[in-house]
Image: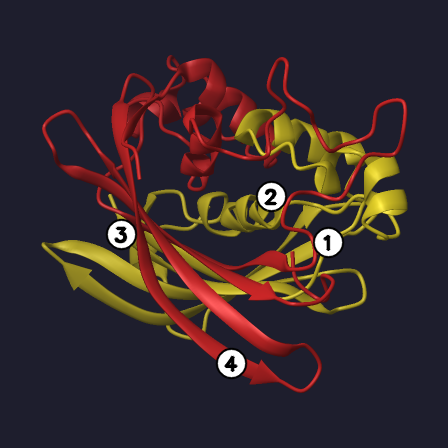
Amino acid sequence: MTMVRELEIGGTHTQLLVEELTRTQIVMYAGASGDYNPLHTDEVYATRIAGFPSVLAHGQLTMGLTARLVTSWLDDAVLTAFGVRFSRQVWPGDTLTGTVTVTAVGEQDGRPTAELMLITTNQEDQTVVSGYARVRGE
Amino acid sequence: MPRFQFPVEAGHVLCFARAVGDDDPVRYDAEHERTIHRGGLSASPTFVAAVAQFDPDWPYRPRPGQPWYGSGRGPGTPPPGAGTTSLHAEQHYEYHRQVRPGDVLTVERSAGAAWEKHSARSGRLRFEEEITRFTDPAGELVVTARRVRVITGGPAEGLT
């Protein structure tokens, strides 16, 4: 793993976040988060009432998967901010890959800090979420 | 909007971590060397989204004795307010400190900014911010969350 103080502007890290997302993982997220919206949990409702091709993942599930880009790459990072824009729906069977790019490095109260740009794409290389994170090394 | 309490429990932190593919031992193994080095168990970065479990007004949870619009014997019914679509457009978190099992957070929501845009494809789009503040018993901010919703007059397209 990498330490925050080792980061350099322009450095990147790419990681597979989920391979062929399952309906079961969407159900796990519904159960853990408390968001039981039938668009995410009920294939019959999602297709016959809402008119979607299937259930779709919670945007927040994709955001949670995207957080792994930072927390599994940077050994000592404490997140101080994290934000995303949801740009495309995520469906069962999608494979998501995230890329993080270091956009700034600094120091605060004697501890290293960094600003990161995050992009998560699906198997067709379409962006599903994009955002930023700010981290501090411990 | 009402204030309510969000008790952060170790089992909930574990279940949430599993759901987002977060297998870091700091989420579930208090005795792990890495957890001890990191100052104890802590929740995944987006864990506070699970505040929905404790929100008395959360609409996306079936309740005993009340109709639910998902499928049962039939395919379900359109939700109340159908005709407009509310989509989650953005989500932002500011972390003032880490969330840890044992925390009892007080949750307060307030409306933020609202604005409108015109889109050739979707017509009039209304954006609304909602700010959620999570504070500890000493009144110190732990996390500030800002959700941006977009409300359209037509069916859902492009967003989640």
Hey, what amino acid is under mark 2? Leu
Hey, what amino acid is under mark 3? Arg
Q: Secondary structure at mark 3?
A: strand
Chain that the image shows in red? B
Marked residue chain, label 3: A
- State the CA–CA distance, disc 1 to disc 3: 30 Å
- Label 3, on which residue? A136
Q: Give the quadrant of the C terminus of chain B.
A: bottom right
Marked residue chain, label 1: A
Label 2 Cα neighbours within 10 Å, binned few <14 / some 14-19 / many ≥20: many
Instruction: Name the colour assigned to chain A in the rendering.
Output: yellow
Nearer the viewer's eye, disc 1 or disc 4? 4
The foreground one among A122 and A3 is A122
- Label 4, on which residue? B117
Q: Which mark is residue A61?
A: 2
In the shown orientation, is residue B53 left or right of residue A133? Answer: right
The reply to whether callout 2 and callout 4 are in contact (CB within 8 Å) is: no
Nearer the viewer's eye, disc 1 or disc 3? 1
Q: Secondary structure at mark 2?
A: helix
The answer as to whether the residues below labels 2 and 4 share one chain is no
Residue drawn 71% across and 81% down? B121
Hey, what amino acid is under mark 1? Val
